Amino acid sequence: MIDKRIDSLIDAVADIFDGATVMIGGFGEAGSPIELIHALIDQGAKNLTVVNNNTGSGHVGLAALIENGQVCKMICSYPRTVSSKVFPELYRSGKIELELVPQGTLAERIRAGGAGIPAFYTATSVNTPLAEGKEQRTFDGRDYVMEYGLKADFSLIKCERADRYGNLTYNKTARNFAPIMATAAATTIVQTGYLVEVGAIDPEVVVTPGIFVDRVITIAEPAQESKLVAEGRIYPCR
Amino acid sequence: MSIVNRQDFGWNREAMAKRAALDIPDGSYVNLGIGIPELVAQFVPEGREVIYHTENGLLGMGPAPAEGEIDPELINAGKKAVTVIPGGSYFHHADSFTMIRGQHIDVCVLGAMQVSEQGDLANWSTGDPDAIPAVGGAMDLVAGVKTIYVITQHCTKTGEPKLVESCSYPLTGKAVVSRIYSDLAVIDVTPGGFEVVELAPRVSFNYVQKRTGCKLLAGQQLADAAK
């Protein structure tokens, strides 16, 4: 029997090890698996390399994971947002590494990693500082820079509906990086708003087929990051 | 609304956006950058059907929702709440940037820190070592979208020209901009350099030239308008 359901957040993230590369879904708060991130804070794995488009807001979710000293490197396209304070301070004091990647290159690197493609060429970033030191080739008269596929030990993502096979559907623009991150990690851990019976999701509308998913935990009423930030909440509570 | 601001001189933000909107063809797929470019959607002339793309995974982006109808999972690339039009679609990031990098998006309107007379764009970093570098999707957009328009104030807040011989800031892309809409003029990037094709109300060619970091050409349209 295939049953990827898992009952506790502690069990869901228990094997994330020190030094792991962890992809975390979300674009800002949309799609951020905040309960899984908080479980990872409770679990305490250190020296993590985290892949996310941003670096979190306030003192909850991804920002809290960074603030808790668990992240040694961020791979992202846009590390500063209006309410992101944690990452900028650590970055300026040299306490966290940043690999800045154009957003489309980041997405394609993850897609390639999930598809078994070790590297590819793209026109994005040619003639800019982000292409420096990278191999370049010319195809049909246009210059391209080589970028490597990106894989992870774990992906933490959020979806709207899941079944016990791990078939997933998402909600609006909360989908963003989740489907590609699910393909690129050795272990993909999903928090879902609803768990439905196998067969309840029309095969025509499955976005992430269950083959890419390892664990599913139901979080019926996930916290809303912007609300926590507005309330001045800090995780873990002190 | 009036296209002339209170000082009756130059174009304000809305007027710049309105002027740029005139150049968005019917049937286009369009990506609008954060800031003044976002305003362009309000001014596309009646009768044109334009589909807006936002790189975080939505084609068919509609205007901001009414207060009380905000959905934190329906946002644009600037992380602001938006709506979806009938016929819209959601997709993941790799598909979204396939639309951009695969040259499927027709027009992108972006802001700028500097534009060079070769059409080089700098709009992501001043190169200041203390700043946190952040690039987002800007480099993908300029590398992949067929037509890149820039909307920008003609000069910085301290009066430095933003239209320059060559960019001193790190580039977003080389030779990518085709037209600039500033508060003073509409300017094309041509093989010969910047060519002024339209002046804002009460603005003279010489006034624009004095605030530009390289030599401007007067387009045929200016000569025709002067007749």
Image (tube, coloured by chain):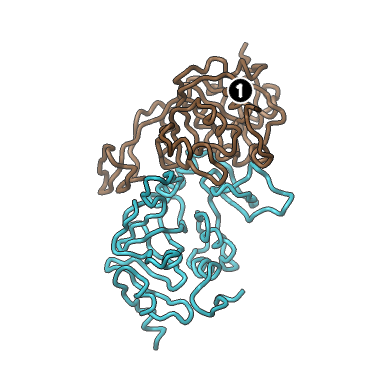
Chain colours: A brown, B cyan
Q: Is residue B141 left or right of residue B49?
A: left
Q: Is residue B48 left or right of residue B23?
A: right
Does any portion of residue A111 appear in the rendered image? no
- In the image, B201 versus A188, the foreground residue is B201
Q: Can you say which quadrant of the picture contains the N terminus of chain B?
A: bottom right
Which residue occupies 51% across, 19% down? Answer: A45
- SS class of the residue under badge 1? helix
Where is residue A201, by image quadrant? top right
Residue drawn 55% across and 49% down? Answer: B78
Image-based side of B165 in relation to A237, left or right? left
Tell me which amino acid carries mark 1: Ala
Question: x and y percent of residue B224 in the render?
Answer: 39, 83
Up-down relation of residue A87 to residue B55 (above or below): above
Disc 1: which chain? Answer: A
Task: Give above or below for B176 relative to A238.
Answer: below
Query: Does B5 sit above or below residue A86?
Result: below
Label 1: which residue? A39
The outermost residue toward the bottom is B227
